[in-house]
Structures are given as structure tokens and as C-alpha cells.
Image: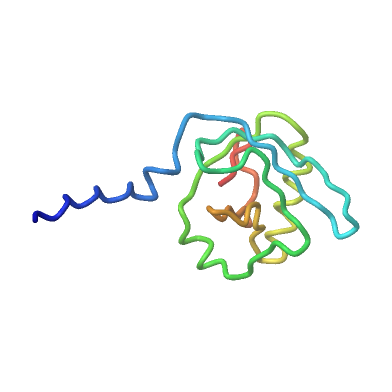
Amino acid sequence: AAAAPAAPPPPSPSDLHHGPSRTLALYATAPDGKRTLLANVTATFALCPDELEATPDGYDKDLDKVQSCPIFPARVVEGDSNALAGFLAYLVARKKAAVLSRGPPRVYLEPQTLGPQGAVV
């Protein structure tokens, strides 16, 4: 009997992540449980949930690992970019990334400053 043809290989992860531009809500939750909308951003990250949230237990100090993950640029479209800028300054000062979604896929917000026209990665 002949063996069944091999199944095609799965698509590469890079093929799975990019899609049409869409709006994602970015939240931060304080230790006291207060949830704040930092900003709405547009991105082409197809597998990403529509809402991303930084929680008090969701930080990673292994920045080498975080920086080896695929990068998906996003741009602030509405909301309080000052709140997002303040949160990014907090990440930079503490040299840690926020885990915005435990996944799959896991989504991080690297320590950075808010770029021109509200750009973040």
C-alpha cells in the first residue's frame, strides 16, 4: 500500500501575524484593580486579541528575550496618548516590558518612548 502524501507544512509564524489594519484597545490595571484605557492603537497584528492589558503581575525583565520576538508597529489613533506616554516612561525607568497578552501568542510592550505621530512597537 502506498503511504498517504505528507501534509503540507504549517504556515510560518511570520505569515500568521500580519493582517489588515485594525484597532486594538490598550489597558493598564493598577494593583488596586483600577483599569485605565491608555490608548486605542491601530496595528496589523492579526492574531492579537482586540483588547490588550498590562496587569500588576504581567511584567518581564528579560529584555533580550522580549526583543527577539516579532515586532508589530502600532500607532495611537485615539484616547489619551499622555497616559500611554506615562506608562511607557514607567517601563523605561524600571527596565521591563509589559505582558499585554499571555497568548498564544504572547504580546509584549517594550520599554520605549512614544514615537512621532504616536508610534509604538
Considering every residue shown, the one lying at the far front of the view is: 1
Residue 104 vertical position relative to residue 118 in the rendered view, above or below: below
Q: Is residue 40 left or right of residue 49?
A: right
Q: Which colour scheme is used?
A: rainbow
Residue 43 vertical position relative to residue 70 in the rendered view, above or below: above
User: Residue 16, located in which quarter of the rendered image?
Assistant: top left
User: Residue 25, located in which quarter of the rendered image?
Assistant: top right
Horizontal and vertical percent position of residue 33? 88, 54
**Residue at image coords 53%, 53%:** 105
Quadrant (top left, top right, bottom left, bottom right) of the N terminus: bottom left
**Residue at image coords 75%, 58%:** 90
Residue 12 vertical position relative to residue 44 in the rendered view, above or below: below
Residue nearest the observer in this picture, 52 or 42: 52
Residue 50 vertical position relative to residue 66 in the rendered view, above or below: above
Horizontal and vertical percent position of residue 18? 44, 39
**Residue at image coords 45%, 34%:** 19
Considering every residue shown, the one lying at the far right of the view is: 32
Give the total number of marks visible in the rendering. Answer: 0
Considering every residue shown, the one lying at the far left of the view is: 1
**Residue at image coords 66%, 66%:** 95
Horizontal and vertical percent position of residue 57? 75, 64
